[in-house]
Amino acid sequence: MTSRRRLGVGVIGFGWMGQAHSRSYRRIPTLFPERTYDPDLVLISDNVSARVDDAVDSFGFREGTTDWRAVIDHPDVDVVSICAPNMLHEPLAIAAAEAGKHVFCEKPVGGTPAQTVRIEAATRAAGVTTGVGYNYRWAPLVQYAKQLIDAGELGEITNYRGRFFSMYGSDPMGLLSWRFMLGEAGHGVSSDILSHSVDLAHMLVGPITDVVGTGHTFIPERPLPKKGGTHYDRGEPGDPIGSVENEDYFGAMVEFENGAQGVFESSRSIIGPESQNAFEVYGTKGSLKWNLETMNELDVFLVGQKTRGYTKVYGGDRYPYHGHFVPGDANAIGFEDMLTIEDHEFLSSVAADRQHTPGFAEAIDYVSVQQALLTSWETRRWERVTRLAPR
């Protein structure tokens, strides 16, 4: 029998992502027999006691609490998974690192670039392994796209188009949840979903050196939330309203270090696209396109192929990790399967005592771009991307 390292897991925040990661930890032993660790769900924390009870009763946590400090202080917890609102991440992540816990945190780590910088510095000083929730990197066909680019199949990369269009904030009656508030979410789509688009570009093409961008808030007021309400819940006409404090939209043009030119857009209030995290990569010998809404398909065009036009490649067990979930070709996997791959990769890094990618260093890569974009929004001109560091 293979010797495996027990990794005690504590989760802080039991909303959608906290629940998704918890399901992932439970599934890992059934999907990855080659693993070098065994996840042990030790302790869950959430400020809603009903969620805590559900985590213990239905998800298999040993214990539950409404005090996040108990997760960090628990002697059996080796890894802390932070799924709380963005602006709460800094004290949680720093306390966990100072207690010697390895830290996985939902993107973009801090609610503001400055918070992310402080968190990264503290975790680096503590010497713990870090991971950031850029889960779309782990889609099998995204991994295959990277293989094609790295192998030179597309030639020299000349152009990149990235977008993340979502309808989650398109309903004016959608509640004024924490995601719309500076004090809880930090910035809007530039923190929430644009971060995914830029992170994929960093992974596939490389660093961004110069940017120009602008943002906008299309729905300035929303109904106030009920206790425990999310941005998916809906108010009614006549409900008390409050002001949205961060941006619904961000668009940008960029230049990459390798000379490629790029365009990015993100919106949470657009009508039509449901969850369109998509990219297009163009090179001198070919191009490819991927979209989360059809995540088991990749369109590839290679110069010299017999038939003109894109070839549709379907996901299958020949691509990284797909076969852990279903065998054969064109048998689809889903969002939480991708999340399970992400959690397996992170816990594998912890078990091997190595720094993980993407970790908080990659989070700094993004927030450095974000800060340049936010500055450009104010100055209305091109800005150089400068890697952020503690002051």
Image (cartoon, rainbow, N blue to C red):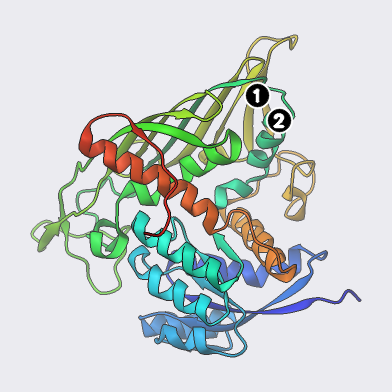
Query: Is residue 6 depicted above or below 62 in this figure?
Result: above
User: Which quarter of the image is occupied by the N terminus?
Assistant: bottom right
The circle on residue 234 is none
**357 with respect to 267 (left or right):** right
User: Which residue is located at x 53 percent, y 27 percent?
Assistant: 280
Mark 2 secondary-structure assignment: helix
Quarter of the view holding residue 390: bottom left
Above or below residue 336? Residue 155 is above
Q: Which of marks 2 and 1 is nearer the N terminus?
A: 2
For this rendering, which residue is in front, 280 or 19? 280
What residue is rendered at 20% in x and 49% in y? Answer: 172
Horizontal and vertical percent position of residue 111:
35, 59
| Residue occupied by mark 1 | 300
The image position of residue 105, as x and y in percent, is 50, 65
Whether tag 2 and tag 1 are in contact, CB under 8 A, the answer is yes
| Label 2, label 1: how far apart the Cα atoms are | 10 Å
Which residue appears farthest toward the right when viewing the image?
Answer: 1
Image spot of residue 300 (x, y percent): 65, 24
Q: Is residue 339 left or right of residue 68?
A: right
Please tell me the numbered disc located at residue 148.
Answer: 2
